[in-house]
Amino acid sequence: MPHVAKDFSHLKGTLEGISEKQLDAHFALYNGYVTKINEIEEKLKTADRSKANYSFNEYSELKRREAVAFNGVYLHNLYFENLSGKGGTASDDVQRAAVAAFGSWDAYVADLKACGASTPGWVLTTWNRVDKALHNYVMYEHHIGLPAHQEIVLAMDCWEHSFFLDYGAKKADYLGAFVKNVNWAEVNKRFAALHR
């Protein structure tokens, strides 16, 4: 079944510090990932598996890039879903989990931003099923850096395509804008679903 891009145009004009022009560019890139994962999956149906190897083979390359395109779609879905422009607040449960893991709410936010400054890729706040705690993990690319046994609670895109039109090289300003625009209702819903 082909992957389909979601329509996130409702975000335009609602986000503080993230312009419509920036969103349009980001949506175009997101749509490119949808096109690419569909292309990869279609080619995998007929790719010759008999000569698969580490150095180079069409099947091998398609498999190596499959996770990049797949995560490019679904991490962007999570990212756009956890933006709103309305801000809101984290639920008591999310705040308690953040305080337990990071010492305070402010320490969680500071860690989220520090992680954002540490990667050209993604930062994911997850519920770790091993230690039953929130973590911020840095992903250097769409498919590199997320440990096993994680449930994604919040996704922050830190690639230049998410901020460069608005902020140039001032990534810290974008990270601040992102935090102001988190759709905490969505994050709260994801977190609550893990604890039913």
Image (cartoon, rainbow, N blue to C red):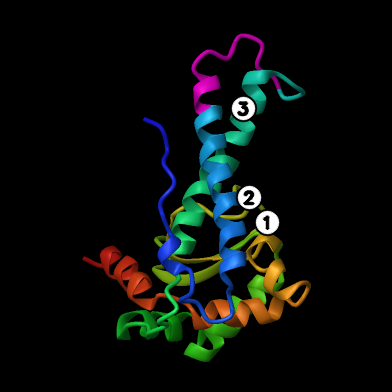
Would you name the residue on which mark 1 appears?
A: 140
Q: Position of residue 31 (x, y in %)?
A: 53, 46
Question: Most prominent secondary structure in the magenta stretch?
Answer: loop
Q: Quadrant of residue 149?
A: bottom left
Residue span colored magenta: 41-53
Q: Of discs 3 and 1, which sits in the foreground?
A: 3
Q: Vertically, is 121 above or below 61?
A: below
Left or right: residue 84 versus residue 69 is left
Q: Amino acid at mark 3?
A: Leu
Q: Vertically, is 12 above or below 161?
A: below
Q: Position of residue 180 (x, y in %)?
A: 51, 83
Q: Amino acid at mark 1?
A: Tyr
Left or right: residue 36 versus residue 86 is right
Alpha carbon distance from label 2 to label 3? 16 Å
Would you name the residue on which mark 2 appears?
A: 144
What SS does tag 1 mark?
A: loop
Would you name the residue on which mark 3 appears?
A: 62
Left or right: residue 47 versus residue 173 is left
